[in-house]
Amino acid sequence: MNRWLVVLGAVLIQLNLGAVYAWSLFNQPLIDKFGWAREDVVVTFSITVAVFAFVTIFAGRLQDKKGPRWVATIGGILLGIGVILASQATTLFQLYFFYGVIGGIGIGMTYVCPLSACVKWFPDKRGFISGVAVAGFGLGGLIYKPIISNLIELTGVSDSFIYIGIIYLVLVVAGAQLLKNPPADYQLQVGQPGSDVDKEGQYTAKQMVGTYQFYLLWAMFLFGSVSGLMVISFAVDIGVDLAQLSLEQAGNAVMMIALFNATGRIALGKLSDRFGRMNTLIVSYAVTALVMFYMSTGVLNYPLFLLAVSLIGFCFGGFLALFPSVTADYYGTKNMGSNYGFMYQAYGLSAFVGPLVVKALPFTQAFLLASLLCILAIVMARFVKKPEIVLAERLKEGRGVIAN
């Protein structure tokens, strides 16, 4: 099988899953139609992200056993059905359940499948291929912004859910048909015939969470994601409050962040293949720490504001591209789905922590705290070494064999 077809399916899926980040387009139309409070409508997005992140644990384990195609297909169907049912919502509870819970389960079931399949097919380009796979997720909101806006204007907010749900269902299910794991004896031949690139320990999720490295990596992922989402979630407000920009000027940050977010996923993933995963992460944390410190203490004008949020978006994209590869490097690809499902909970938590910190502290203090967290992540990165499975544990469970 041409392994690039798997990448095509992965990108198609992620573009549609990433459209969840365009939720803010629904806020005002729903407020106008039903008279709901803004803070109540916004909760829909938080529920979707929380359910999506939590479900990746179970979906990852399921796709490790059953394969990515069927799990992603079911996820695409659930996502489409959830969004379509949201068109019938007349209460906040119905909206939360249809879009947030059912749609969130669909995204969570699907998200890990293309990542896991791509990493297994490309042991020689893990960073780059992870970046390509998740770049679609970063671009989804940008690409769907005009589609969703036009549908809401033409059909109304409730009916727009029907058409959007159908689009998600058809395209995600179509992309899922291209997903397939490599054969069990698959070895990528590089250089000398018969050379095996993928010599690594194959950890179960239980074995993984028994290593101290997992907790260091999990905390690092959390700190980087908190810093990124802190800026991304409030980019317009930051521009207006700190840089004294107009709403129109500050709004340009949304597009800049989306573009640099997607670029960072591919570029930093590619660089990590050449210079090492930890080295690339350390540089990303260092840049994030410096930018956050400047935003906390320096003077922002329009060009500097766009530069700052673009750099944050670039590094944030890198975090989301590198941690799937790090998980595969440290814990193997056999159980990649379930293992990364556990690692991904750091991102799920950050979706709440970042905005909460900004609500509790002024921007300048929140940015200074984020800068300190990134410095702490750099220190952690210096102590993270590839784990070794205890021999007794391997013999006891009959799993986790490390190639010699």
Image (spheres, rainbow, N blue to C red):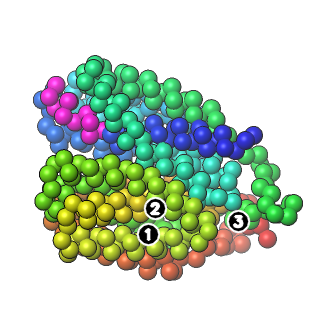
Mark 3 is on which residue type?
A: Glu
Which of pointers 1 and 2 indicates the residue nearer the eye? 1
Q: Earlier in the sequence, mark 3 or mark 2?
A: 3
Task: Please say whether residue 28 is one of the residues in the magenta stretch.
Answer: yes
Choose between 276 and 60: the one closer to the eye.
276
Which of pointers 3 and 2 indicates the residue nearer the eye? 2
Q: Quadrant of residue 339?
A: bottom right
Q: Earlier in the sequence, mark 1 or mark 2?
A: 1
Q: CA distance from mark 3 to mark 2?
A: 22 Å
The residue singled out by tag 3 in the image is: 200
Relative horizontal placement of residue 357, taking residue 170 as reference (left or right):
left
The residue singled out by tag 1 in the image is: 284
The residue singled out by tag 2 in the image is: 319
Q: Which residues are magenta?
A: 23-33
- Whether residue 110 can be seen here: no
Local crowd size for mark 2, using a 10 Å CA cut-off: few (<14), some (14–19), many (≥20):
many
Q: Quadrant of the C terminus?
A: bottom right
Q: CA distance from mark 1 to mark 2?
A: 8 Å
Circle 3/circle 2 CB separation < 8 Å: no
- Whether residue 180 can be seen here: yes
Circle 1/circle 2 CB separation < 8 Å: yes
Task: Give percent across and percent down for residue 370.
Answer: 30, 69
Relative horizontal placement of residue 194, taking residue 331 as reference (left or right):
right
Residue at x 70% of width, y 44% of height: 3
Which of pointers 3 and 1 indicates the residue nearer the eye? 1
Choose between 63 and 118: the one closer to the eye.
118
Task: Please say whether residue 305 is one of the residues in the magenta stretch.
Answer: no
